Amino acid sequence: MTDTTEREIFYRISPANEGLVFATANDALRNHAMRTALEASKTWGELRRSVGEEEYQALLGKMSVHISEPVVVPNNEDPFDRDQIPGYWDGDFPGSLQSQMEQLLPADILAKFGERVATRLNGSYMHIDPSSEKRFVLALRKLGYVVHRRADLFFT
């Protein structure tokens, strides 16, 4: 992996469980965009413009699968309510980046600093206590990762 973007990692303290969450820059930005759009959009048109057409269509597809039939495409001026999004209040949508950290980060570093935690509804994830932040980030940087703390983004 010589491409810097492959090793560029964003992280923050997760508002969901106060553990550290690490993600690729692209995944963190996509998760942030979807979460902020779901929180801020007042109409379906606002949501569509906020997340872009590809993400919007994927969301409608997810809704169709959830109800086992095609979803009626809302008009742009129709009121938007995030309660309509399957899995939003369960923490299933948008997906948890913490549950993907084991595919992203080196196993030996995760084993040293992390703890596997099982949840009631959402499976398990690797919990990294914020008290390990400096040592964890240093270990990643020694392996060539470009690591940025991004408390300004809302991703979990």
Image (cartoon, rainbow, N blue to C red):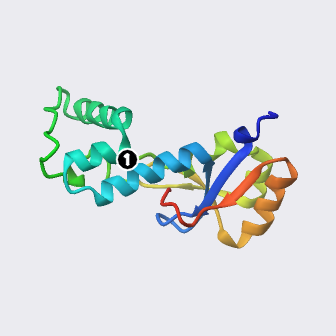
Would you place residue 95 above or below residue 12 in this image? above
Which residue is painted at 17% across and 26% down in the image?
70
Would you place residue 84 above or below residue 132 in this image? above
- Name the secondary structure under disc 1: loop
* Disc 1: CA contacts within 10 A as few (<14), some (14-19) or many (>=20): some
- Is residue 7 something one can see in this rendering? yes
The outermost residue toward the bottom is 131
State the image quarter where residue 3 is shown.
Answer: top right
- Between 119 and 81, the one lying in front of the other is 81
- Between 10 and 93, the one lying in front of the other is 10
Q: Is residue 61 left or right of residue 27?
A: left
Which residue is painted at 17% across and 43% down in the image?
76
Q: Position of residue 135 (x, y in %)?
A: 80, 65
Which residue in the protein does label 1 denote?
A: 93
Which residue is painted at 23% across and 31% down in the image?
64
- Between 39 and 99, the one lying in front of the other is 39
